[in-house]
Every structure is written in structure tokens, then in C-alpha cells.
């Protein structure tokens, strides 16, 4: 093997090396028995799906509303679990490697620090992604069976009341729109995007933080602040704060520039309500997520590159 | 010292990236609001009502989850017959999820039906108090639905709920208002076509309940009758018949009986059924007389 190919192998970016680290991180996290939460999620889903809501029988579209409430419960839980996983798992990574002394073993080898960080991040994202996938599967199975049952009930009711075929078809379509659709998957995609951004933020903080708790607390604060970014940006750009103090103006500008805008990812609510999520909007969210993740990852490498242990 | 220089660089990069993404995010937000994909900001005071935990969860982007939990909580208040709490709960729920029809509709139903009936039948209250409390909660329900319609102007279901509320003869009907709400429902672009014909007929029936608007009602009924055979329904035909009698419509402009009714036998049957439902408030001029004359006439 010549010198040039050796250099390429030990270059700053090696997909195979990153995948090895990612795989190791994923296994490490799975061994922490994090998947037990799925039992809680499944019980929550089963409970929500068999909960009869007689008071909802006031509207014409009560079947749709029952499905909306089922999806709200499921996707709310998915969003909460995924963000918690993303923050806690990432915050644990570097301190755990330090404690186990794995970090010294890895970094003493010709592994670039960027590859190490990226591998760790991808490992966490694999965990979050597979958890979301499993939850999505549980939701899809339960939602699908509930949708079929509600369609059958509605059709039987319609036949008894002598509804026209046209109306029966519209009712079927209306209820099916609240079942398992691509728009629902777009909402779950937005949950994943939020978790990806939070994992990369937690990674950045953990590179200069000396405590796991500090990383978690700061990440959670950033997560909540991110939901006000849109308000801060509008306040600043639309000159709503013409009469506000300089401090308030500076604060809104700072928040708008420094924090990610998580309100944009709230298409989750729209997908719960069965609205169409245009592909263009979803692509733009994907682009935004990519840039956020890239910036935070590069900054994490910047602080980590010369860190001494 | 090194950590400070690192933080300075990080902040500088984040600010530069923030400035670059600003317009992109603003445009994306604008497009998403236009397509009603994201919710408006929470109303002032909603955080206080939610309590610290729920507010934190809601602000964390899980408004649908908090609303679903509060919906369950509202049901417990309903079981306890605590109407003040039910009302407060639905105000909070609709502040969290203003675009969900179900929450507006259910909240209003608890107020204008359940709470109103509860007070009306509460025997330990004096009659005047019972009546005023019934009126109060009925109006609260209507106001709640009106707020829902104001926030969702193209939501035909909410307009229809209002129309049904004001045309419900077991509640406190106000046909002028129900007609307005039926017209608002018909004006919604999202209204499915199959519903339109039915709602046009309902608008006509409600107009026919208002004596001052009989001419308008007859014009609408005639138009509906001529529009399609699907509208040649017993109640619609009989109402046109009674309105024509009531308004003494000239022979040249009125729809002849032969055209209105398929045959004498069905005319007799439909008019009898219509007469039985005279308490509904629809005009009945000439109906009784016609039934007698048909009964006396030899069957063909």
C-alpha cells in the first residue's frame, strides 16, 4: 500500500470509520435498555385507541375527531420521547467514553476527531430514528385498525339511514384521510428533524461542558427558546418593537439569530389534523435541518479538535 | 482564556449563519401560515391558565398533546357537572388548537346543551333563576361557536353548528340568526357539493319560519323546486304550497298544484303529514282546507 492511499484512509473524513463508531455508539445505547419505553408507548396507544368518547358524538365528523385525538396522543408522546432521547443520549456520549476510557483508546489511534464526533452523532440519530420507526409502526398498526373499524361503523350507519353512494364515498374518504397517510409520515419526519437538531446542539454543548447535567439543562433551555425564535424574528423584522427598549430589541435580535426556529417544525399539528403537507415545504424543512446540523457539528468539532483530556 | 475565544468564534459563526437563514425562515414561515400548516402564537394569558407543566409542554411544541390531555380533563369536569371548569377548559383547549373543529363544537355543546339543560332542570333554583341560567349558558355556547367561526371563517362545520343551534326548536330558536348562519355555511368554499343542496333547503325552511320574510322564502323555494328534481321533496313542496296561499300568489307566477304534487293521492298524504308537523312553525295557510277538499273529492 503506498503512502498516498494510507493518507486517504486516515484522512479527515472516512465513511467506513464513521459507521464503525456510529454502530458502536448505537450498540452502547441499546445496551442501556432504552427500548423498554416502547412498552409504555404501546400501552398508551392501546389505551387511547379503545377509549370510547361518547361526548364527541355531537359532530358529523366524530369518527375523524376520534382518530385525531388518537394521533395527538401518539405524536405528542413520540415528539417527547425523541427529543428526550436525542438530548440525554448525546449528553452522555463524551462523559461515558471518558469514564470508560474508550475515548483515550479511540483518540490515540489515527481517528480524526471530526470522524469521532460525527460517528457518535450518527449513532444517536440511529437510535432516535429506529425508536421513531418502531413507534411509527405501532401507531400505524393501531391507527389503521381503528380507521377500518370506524369506516365500517360509519358505512353501516349510512346504509341504515339510506345515504347516497356519493355521500358514503365522501365519508369513507374523509375518515381514511385521518388514518395512515403520507402527510402523517411528514409530521413524523418533522419530529425526527427536531430531534436531529437537538442532538447536534447537545453535541456542541457537550464538547465544552464538563457535566452531563449542564449539557442537558442548557439543551432543554435552547429547545424551549427555539419555540420563541419566530416571535423574536417577527418582532425584530416587522418593527413591532419601535417603542421597546434597546435591551428588548437586542434580546429579540439575539434570539432570532442564535437559536433555531422550532415553530417551523410544528407541521406536526397540521399532519395530526389530516392536512396536506406540500412536498415543497417538507423539502425546505429538510434543507434547513441539514444546515442546522452541519453548522452545529462543525462548531462541535471546532471546540473538540484541540481539547485535552 | 481559550474557552472564551472559542465561545466568541461560535457566537460569531452562529450570528452569521443566523443572518443568512433569517429571510429563508421568514419566507418559509409566511408560506406555512398561508397554507395554515402552523398555528398562531398562544393568546396572552393562556400560559397562566395552563399551569407551569402544561405551558412548558405546550411551548415545547406539543400543543396537540396538551389539548388532548385537557380534553380528557374537561370530560371529568363535565361528569362532575362543574360548568365553570368545563368552560375554562375549552377556552384553553381552543387557544391551544384553534383550528380543530371538534374542540369548538364540543365545548359549545357542553355549554348550550348540557349546562343549559342542567340549570333548567335544577329544582332547588327559583323558576326565574333557572330560566336566566339556561339563557346564559345557551348564549355562552353560541358565543363560543361564534368565536370559533371568527377564527376559522372558512370552516363550514362551525357555521353549520351555529345555524343548527339557532334553528333548534327545543332550545331558543332565532330563525333570523339561523338563516344568516346557513348563508355563511353556503358561502364557505370548503363546503362539499353534496351538502349544498341539503343546506339550501334548510335555509329555505328557516326563511319560511319568519313571516316578514315569506316573499323571500317563496322566491327561494320556487327557485329550488325548479333547479332540480332532487328538491321535489314532500316538505319543500308543501311549504311552497302554503306560502303561495299565504301570499296570494297570482296564478301567472305561482307553481300550479299539478306541477307541485305528483298526484292527488300523494298530495293528500304529504299535506296530512305536513299538517301534523304544523308545530314546527312552517306556514300552514290553506293546508287544512285542501286536505278536506281532497278527502271529499272522489278518488281517481
Image (cartoon, rainbow, N blue to C red):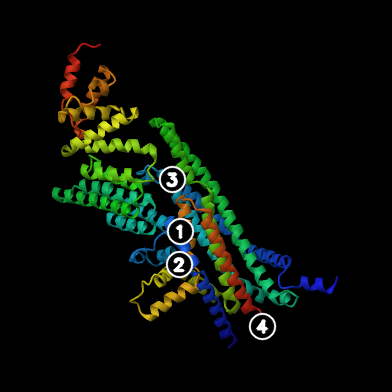
Instruction: Name the residue beneath numbered marker 3.
Output: A64
Q: Residue at x 51, y 74 (%)?
A: A218
User: Could one spot residue B203 in this view of the protein?
Assistant: yes
Q: Nearer the viewer, residue A209 or B18?
A: B18
Name the secondary structure under disc 4: loop
Point out the residue furthest to the front here: B252
For residue B139, the mark is none
Instruction: Name the residue beneath numbered marker 1.
Output: B32
Q: Earlier in the sequence, mark 2 or mark 3?
A: 3
For residue A308, the mark is 4
The C terminus of chain A, quarter of image: bottom right
Callout in the foreground (2, 3): 2
Q: Label 4 neighbourhood size at 10 Å, few (<14), some (14-19), many (20+)?
A: few
Q: Label 2 neighbourhood size at 10 Å, few (<14), some (14-19), many (20+)?
A: many
Name the secondary structure under disc 3: helix
Subunit of mark 3?
A
Disc 4 to disc 3, how far (Cα)? 57 Å
Q: Nearer the viewer, residue A80 or A125?
A: A125
Instruction: Name the residue beneath numbered marker 2.
Output: A227
Subunit of mark 4?
A
Q: Label 3 neighbourhood size at 10 Å, few (<14), some (14-19), many (20+)?
A: many
Q: Residue at x 51, y 69 (%)?
A: B21
Instruction: Mark 1 vs mark 2: tell me if same chain.
Output: no
User: Could one spot residue A82 in this view of the protein?
Assistant: no
The N terminus of chain A, quarter of image: bottom right
Callout in the foreground (1, 2): 1
Q: Residue at x 68, y 65 (%)?
A: A22
Disc 3 to disc 1, how far (Cα)? 23 Å
Amino acid at each position: 500500500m503506498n503512502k498516498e492511499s494510507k493518507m486517504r484512509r486516515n484522512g479527515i473524513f472516512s465513511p467506513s470509520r464513521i459507521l464503525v463508531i456510529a454502530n458502536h455508539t448505537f450498540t452502547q445505547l441499546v445496551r442501556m435498555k432504552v427500548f423498554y419505553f416502547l412498552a409504555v408507548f404501546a400501552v398508551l396507544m392501546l389505551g387511547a385507541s379503545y377509549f370510547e368518547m361518547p361526548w364527541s358524538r355531537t359532530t358529523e365528523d366524530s369518527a375523524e375527531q376520534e382518530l385525531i385525538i388518537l394521533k395527538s396522543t401518539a405524536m405528542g408522546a413520540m415528539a417527547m420521547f425523541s427529543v428526550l432521547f436525542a438530548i440525554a443520549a448525546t449528553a452522555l456520549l463524551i462523559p461515558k467514553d471518558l469514564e470508560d476510557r474508550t475515548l483515550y483508546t479511540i483518540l490515540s489511534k489515527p481517528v480524526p476527531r471530526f470522524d469521532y464526533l460525527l460517528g457518535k452523532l450518527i449513532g444517536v440519530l440511529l437510535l432516535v430514528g429506529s425508536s421513531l420507526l418502531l413507534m411509527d409502526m405501532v401507531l400505524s398498526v393501531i391507527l389503521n385498525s381503528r380507521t377500518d373499524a370506524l369506516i365500517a361503523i360509519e358505512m353501516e350507519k349510512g346504509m341504515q339511514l339510506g345515504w347516497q353512494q356519493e355521500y358514503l364515498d365522501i365519508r369513507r374518504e374523509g375518515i381514511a384521510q385521518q388514518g395512515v397517510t403520507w402527510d402523517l409520515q411528514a409530521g413524523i419526519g418533522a419530529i425526527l428533524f427536531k430531534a436531529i437538531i437537538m442532538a447536534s446542539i447537545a453535541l456542541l454543548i457537550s464538547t465544552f461542558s464538563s457535566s452531563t447535567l449542564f449539557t442537558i439543562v442548557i439543551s432543554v433551555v435552547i429547545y424551549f427558546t427555539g419555540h420563541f425564535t419566530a416571535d423574536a424574528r417577527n418582532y425584530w423584522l416587522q418593527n413591532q418593537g419601535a417603542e421597546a427598549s434597546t435591551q428588548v430589541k437586542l434580546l429579540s435580535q439575539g434570539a432570532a439569530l442564535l437559536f433555531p426556529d422550532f415553530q417551523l417544525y410544528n407541521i406536526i399539528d397540521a399532519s395530526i389534523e389530516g392536512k396536506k403537507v406540500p412536498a415543497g415545504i417538507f423539502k425546505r424543512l429538510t434543507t434547513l435541518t441539514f444546515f442546522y446540523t452541519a453548522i452545529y457539528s462543525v462548531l462541535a468539532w471546532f471546540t473538540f479538535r484541540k481539547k485535552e483530556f | 482564556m481559550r474557552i472564551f475565544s472559542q465561545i466568541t468564534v461560535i457566537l460569531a459563526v452562529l450570528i452569521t449563519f443566523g443572518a443568512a437563514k433569517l429571510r429563508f425562515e421568514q419566507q418559509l414561515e409566511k408560506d406555512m401560515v398561508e397554507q395554515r400548516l402552523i398555528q398562531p402564537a398562544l393568546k396572552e394569558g393562556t400560559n397562566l391558565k395552563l399551569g407551569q407543566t402544561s405551558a412548558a409542554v405546550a411551548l415545547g411544541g406539543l400543543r396537540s398533546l396538551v389539548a388532548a390531555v385537557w380534553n380528557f380533563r374537561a370530560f371529568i369536569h363535565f361528569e362532575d357537572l362543574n360548568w365553570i371548569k368545563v368552560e375554562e377548559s375549552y377556552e384553553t383547549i381552543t387557544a391551544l388548537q384553534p383550528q380543530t373543529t371538534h374542540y369548538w363544537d364540543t365545548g359549545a355543546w357542553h355549554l348550550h346543551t348540557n349546562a343549559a339543560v342542567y340549570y333548567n332542570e335544577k329544582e332547588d333554583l327559583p323558576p326565574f333563576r333557572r330560566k336566566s341560567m339556561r339563557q346564559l349558558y345557551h348564549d355562552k355556547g353560541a358565543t363560543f361557536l361564534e368565536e370559533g367561526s371568527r377564527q376559522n371563517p372558512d370552516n363550514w362545520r362551525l357555521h353549520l353548528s351555529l345555524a343548527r343551534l339557532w334553528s333548534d326548536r327545543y332550545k331558543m330558536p332565532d330563525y333570523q340568526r339561523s338563516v344568516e348562519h346557513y348563508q355563511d355555511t353556503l358561502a364557505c368554499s370548503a363546503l362539499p357539493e353534496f351538502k349544498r343542496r341539503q343546506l339550501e333547503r334548510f335555509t329555505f325552511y328557516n326563511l319560511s319560519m319568519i313571516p316578514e320574510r315569506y316573499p323571500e322564502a317563496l322566491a327561494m323555494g320556487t327557485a329550488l323546486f325548479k333547479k332540480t328534481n332532487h328538491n321535489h321533496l314532500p316538505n319543500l313542496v308543501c311549504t311552497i304550497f302554503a306560502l303561495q296561499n299565504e301570499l296570494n300568489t297570482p296564478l301567472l307566477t305561482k307553481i300550479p298544484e299539478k306541477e307541485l304534487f305528483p298526484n292527488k293521492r300523494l298530495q293528500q298524504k304529504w299535506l296530512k303529514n305536513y299538517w301534523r308537523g304544523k308545530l314546527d312553525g312552517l306556514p300552514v295557510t290553506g293546508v287544512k282546507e285542501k286536505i278536506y277538499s281532497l278527502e271529499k273529492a272522489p278518488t281517481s
